[in-house]
Image (spheres, grey):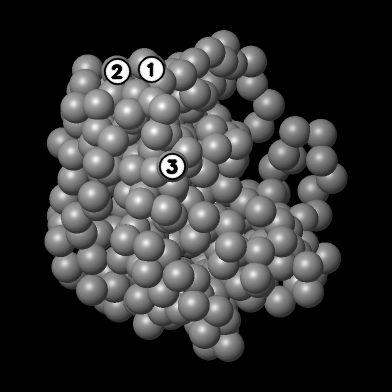
Amino acid sequence: MKFFEPFTVNQMTVKNRLVMPPMCMYSCFAGDGRVTDFHLAHYAARAIGQVGLIIVEATGVTPEGRISDQCLGLWEDAQVEGMRKLVDSVHAQGSKIALQLNHAGRKSTTAAPGHLAPSAIAYNNHEINYAQMTQEDITRVVDGFRLAAQRADAAGYDGLELHGAHGYLIHQFLSPLSNQRADLYGQDRLIFLREVVQAVRTVWPKEKPLWIRISATDWLEGGITAEDWIGWLDCLRGDLDMVHVSSGGLQKANVNVYPGYMLPLARQVGQGAGLPAIGVGYLDEDQLILHALESGACDLVALGRELLRNPNKFNDLAVRYGRPELVAKQYERAYKDRM
């Protein structure tokens, strides 16, 4: 079964197809964006549970670019040491680890002033407490992505994910519902993302994979579609190694949510763009997890809520589907009656 097979993207090989997607823990209680003991324990536990690839939660490239004051950040060198400890703790258990870089744009809830957006357009019914970005703002944020990527490499991360989904800044520039600028960044909504990718590529090693998490659709009339993303990824061909396919988040939308509801989007975008795809979205049932891979809907499968509930999900599946030799040695006794 593909679930148990290794997978290589660029020069990174993961030992199985199970991914822990980025999920914000809001646990930097000092507000300094630095890794805490919680983060070390939280991510190492999933590595002990044999998760092949762990993607660390959304990490702000600027202080005001965090989703909240309790989110991780990588806008200064002092934050690298904690990140390095986190990477080492996951590597020690045999898993690969990537970092998701983000700027929250108009969805930032940080106390710091200076929130930004492509256009001063209301997000749902929230007060507009953000300004349309100037060229100086754009240049500073793009450089923030570059410097954060450089620090992520210094910390030893195996891969890097850009957050282009869920209504955060990159997504805001891409959607016509949130970007109504009259300048070049509005006329060609891909420019901002292209500048971020190009800036990151100047410092991120060529042998390490770089990919993007996307919202393949806004689930709103006049918003982004999967076809848009296929075209954009074609424009970025050679710069991105993989696509992590999610959806929504720009603003409120009526979505029919059911187990595996985003897998068709992963198949459409991944195959349309000719890129390996990470599939995600209420993949809680064992058969659905395996079907996602065996059917070719995606190349890697990301379990969010399920891995929060059960860090040892991989061990459970290994025993259930005839691969008990893959169970972590320390936990074999938990499965003796099932092997």
- The label shown at residue 288 is 1
Q: What amino acid type is highlighted by mark number 3?
A: Arg
Disc 3 to disc 2: CB gap under 8 Å: no
* 3 or 1: tag closer to the N-terminus: 1
| Of the pair 69 and 16, the residue shown nearer to us | 16
Q: Is residue 120 above or below residue 282?
A: below
- Residue 228: where, in percent of width, then height? 34, 31
To which residue does mark 3 refer?
A: 333
Q: What amino acid type is highlighted by mark number 2?
A: His
To which residue does mark 2 refer?
A: 291
The quarter of the picture where residue 277 lies is top left
Image-based side of 322 in relation to 63, left or right: left
Secondary structure under the numbered disc 1 in the rendered image:
helix
- Residue under the point 43% across and 42% down: 333
| Of the pair 52 and 301, the residue shown nearer to us | 52
Locate the N terminus by quadrant: top left
Locate the C terminus by quadrant: top left
- Mark 2 nearby-residue class (10 Å; few <14, some 14–19, many ≥20): some
